[in-house]
Image (cartoon, rainbow, N blue to C red):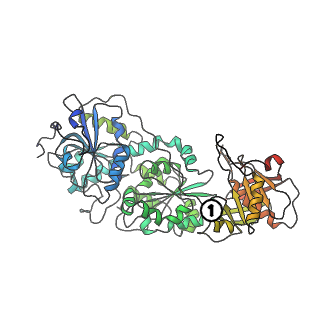
Amino acid sequence: MPPDDASEPTPISENTRLSPNSPTTINSWATGDGRRAVLLAARSAVALYRLLDVVPAFSGDDRITRLFTLVPGSDFGVDALAAIEAVGGRTVPWAEACATTYDLVLTSSPKGDLPLLSGRHVLLPHGAGYNKSIPGEGADSASGLDPALLLRDSAAPIALHALAHPSQVARLAVDDAHAARRAKVIGDPTLDRALASRPLRDQYRAALKTGPRTLLVLVSTWGRESLLRQRPDLPARLAAHLPHDEYQLALVVHPNERSRLGTFELTEMLAPALDAGMILAAPHGEWASVLIAADALITDHGSAALYYCAVADRPVVSSYQGGAELIADSPMHTLLRRIPRLGPAEAVADALRAYRPGAGLEAADAAFAYQGDGLNRLRTELYALLDLTPPGPGCPLRPLPSPRPADRSPTGFDVHAELTTEGVRIARRPVGIALPGHHLAVEYGAADENLTRSAGLLYRHPVRTSATQAELAWTADGWARYALSTYPGCRSAAAILPSGMCLLRVRGHARPYLLQTGPKDDGDGRIARADPAAVASAAHAWLLARTARPRLPLHLVCHIGARDFRVLIRPVSDAEAAQPV
């Protein structure tokens, strides 16, 4: 039985082991030498990720023992165990955890059998505000603030209920004045980490290979009213509509939804968009770095959008179709009421332009207090509960990890080409999900044989080689000749050189051309560079439209979205034609 007085925790049993497979006893850490045992108790992966954002509060302190346990009863618990294993955490089986008293029990959800864990409990924010009421969870209150879940006996009291904003304390007081007295406004440690990582935005975009494109991120919460349940075809429709050289897509999925479906089912469901190059962000850390990198957001009623809004005031639009979950006057309700709503996927550009600055920041300010200082405020409270002096003036915030680029990328494009007075306007869309255009451009060596044989333009990126190995490589013009002779349906072959210039050989033309594209000054101190494969498509379309051979050198303008890139077309030198690719 747990002790009646939780203010004086009993020592951890000397013969309690971390797990059946570990011979190390907890007693080796806590035997009266001033050490403190802190148990991180999570029911699901998302709850665990919130706890991991708080662990740096104890960074560098060898007086603290950090242990994990999985609270049973959630449909989403399997991924939590995998996440603990991924960070190398020491796990205490649930039965053993319930037989031990800890100095602190940290949790980010009040659900489940948490009262069976003895010690002072600290309940941390589970997300950005309390915006949803989940049908079937019990009381008709904000998920996470159900008074029935906050009632505790003396063995497992909530010593601190850390909240992110004064409005949350006020909401709690309406239903349970006693619980509200244990609440303090701390801020949000997860937001702190995102705010501290803002200077890494360019690094994150480079890691994602975004380039000059607009990174459009979709965020989907979990449950029947989520984006993926209400509009499951939206990612694929956007991938089919948005030109590849102007937009990059990414998707952030709530960990509960990932657990419900499983990675295999989720990726198969999203296959058309993923094959078109959409990024599927990892659920811990990476989702927030993708939001920092984003230029625009499409959201349902999930709270991830509030982190995006707090980081910067960039366009955000709503895909939420309505339902019973969204709580009136919550921060997300405020946001969704004041931002444009997305109708058909094809109207996304208009919806993004309709966003009015200020709406996102206003909603974020209604969800987060003490922005940037939440972890230090929480650290002060935790060390007071542990009756320890913190080991230094503050704890450093750990930057978010760099996100991974897309696992897949398009291997062919339906290219829409429109001749202008100066050159050619190009819009490339991944083959297979968009309507056919002027020509099919296919990457040699990446696409299958059927697609390769159907290409009007074949292009090839340089193959990375090692100077320490024997090798056999094509020259640029040698490969272009080979491609045109091997694939009779192909009209042009483009070999992209390591310099970024491009050798283009057109069937029936005596000599190849060299395409040299200058950077575009965006006027804000940055320059943009075009994808050489897109420039090759522009030159291919322009040259095929002419009845006479052009006089060289000449300048051509390649229009990609709002940018105009000047392309010099000139004869290829012998040295350039002989460059290995």
What x and y, as percent, mark residue 368?
A: 39, 47
Identify the residue under disc 1: 447
Q: Amino acid at mark 1?
A: Ala
In percent of width and height, residue 468 lies at 64, 40
Residue at 43 percent across and 42 percent down: it is 193
Could you tell me which residue is drawn at 76 percent across and 58 percent down?
480
Which x, y percent locates residue 124?
Answer: 30, 46
Q: Nearer the viewer, residue 435 or 378?
A: 435
How many discs appear?
1
Residue 424 in sight from this viewpoint: no
Which residue occupies the foreground of this view, 158 or 76? Answer: 76
- Residue lying farthest to the front in this orientation: 470
- Relative to 450, is 146 above or below? above
From the viewer's perspective, tell me whether residue 425 is left or right of residue 60.
right
Residue 63, given in percent of the width and then of the height, sits at 28, 31
* 414 or 557, nearer to the observer: 414
Q: Residues within 10 Å of mark 1 (few under 14, many from 20)?
A: some
Figure quadrant of residue 444 = bottom right
Element at label 1: loop
Q: Is residue 183 left or right of residue 487?
A: left
Observer-nearest of 483 and 18: 483
Q: Residue furthest bottom?
A: 435
